Amino acid sequence: MIVYQETKKKFLNDVRLDLIEEKIERKVLERLHKKTAHNEFLSWMNSMQYMYKVLEEKSIPDDSVIAIEYRIPNSNKRVDFIISGEDGLGRESAVIIELKQWQKLEKVDSKEAVVKTHLQGRMVETTHPSYQAWFYVSMIEDYNEDVRKYKINLQPCAYLHNYRLQEHDDLTDSCYEYYIDKAPVFTRGDTDKLAKFISKYIKKRES
């Protein structure tokens, strides 16, 4: 189930007019029968402004399709952001983006794909964002019959738009290399890099 689904052009307009977070909140209530926590509402307000800057890139077609808060079948997992269309060879394609508000983290190299970051007022262990994006794609491929049937190309990535990457940063430590190779991680200042990544796979709207 998809909470919010519009063309890129419509999405940009909803963000520009400061309507996007309220529209998502209303759709979550209508379709998921779930009230939105205040911190989640604020995260939409913040993250969608950054996605607006990314999607201003003109090489990403206006009629490509944006999906927000896609609930993976047979699970309670929700994908933050998807942009779909066709690649240069006419194959159906989608970029899966895991959005994070994080500003810093610490590596946990004693555990597979685990980091420590500040959540809900304290430092906690959680999965690395690249692993999370890759795992969501794996789940979609397992549970969505259309993805398998039509061989839809899914490309995961993570976008930590508040995170300023430092030299020798724990986020990109070699212990996470396997998952970063599968799902590249973009950070604050990477607007153009993420736009280029998306435009590599989304050339036109699905026919």
Image (cartoon, rainbow, N blue to C red):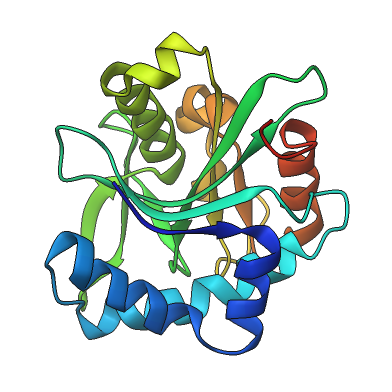
Give residue 102's position: percent from left, percent from top. Answer: 43, 66
User: Which of the 4 quarters of the picture holds residue 55?
Assistant: bottom right
**Which residue shows up at 81% across the image and 56% down it?**
192
User: Which of the 4 quarters of the picture holds residue 184?
Assistant: top right
**Which residue shows up at 24% across the image and 85% down it?**
38
Give residue 35's position: percent from left, percent from top. Answer: 14, 76
The residue sitting at the right extreme is 58
User: Which of the 4 quarters of the picture holds residue 180?
Assistant: top right
Q: Looking at the picture, does residue 188 appear above or below residue 182? A: below
Q: Looking at the picture, does residue 95 appear above or below residue 66? A: above
Position of residue 52 in the picture relative to residue 77 (left or right): right
**Which residue shows up at 47% across the image and 27% down it?**
179
Position of residue 133 in the picture relative to residue 93 (left or right): left
**Which residue shows up at 79% across the image and 49% down it?**
60
- Seen from the viewer's position, the closer of residues 75 and 160 is 75
Position of residue 35 in the picture relative to residue 42 (left or right): left
Q: Is residue 123 visible?
A: no
- Seen from the viewer's position, the closer of residues 88 and 103 is 88
Q: Is residue 183 visible?
A: yes
Q: Looking at the picture, does residue 98 appear above or below residue 95? A: below
Give residue 27's position: percent from left, percent from top. Answer: 30, 69
Q: Looking at the picture, does residue 108 appear above or below residue 35? A: above
The residue sitting at the front extreme is 207
The residue sitting at the bottom extreme is 17
Rendered-image quadrant of the C terminus:
top right
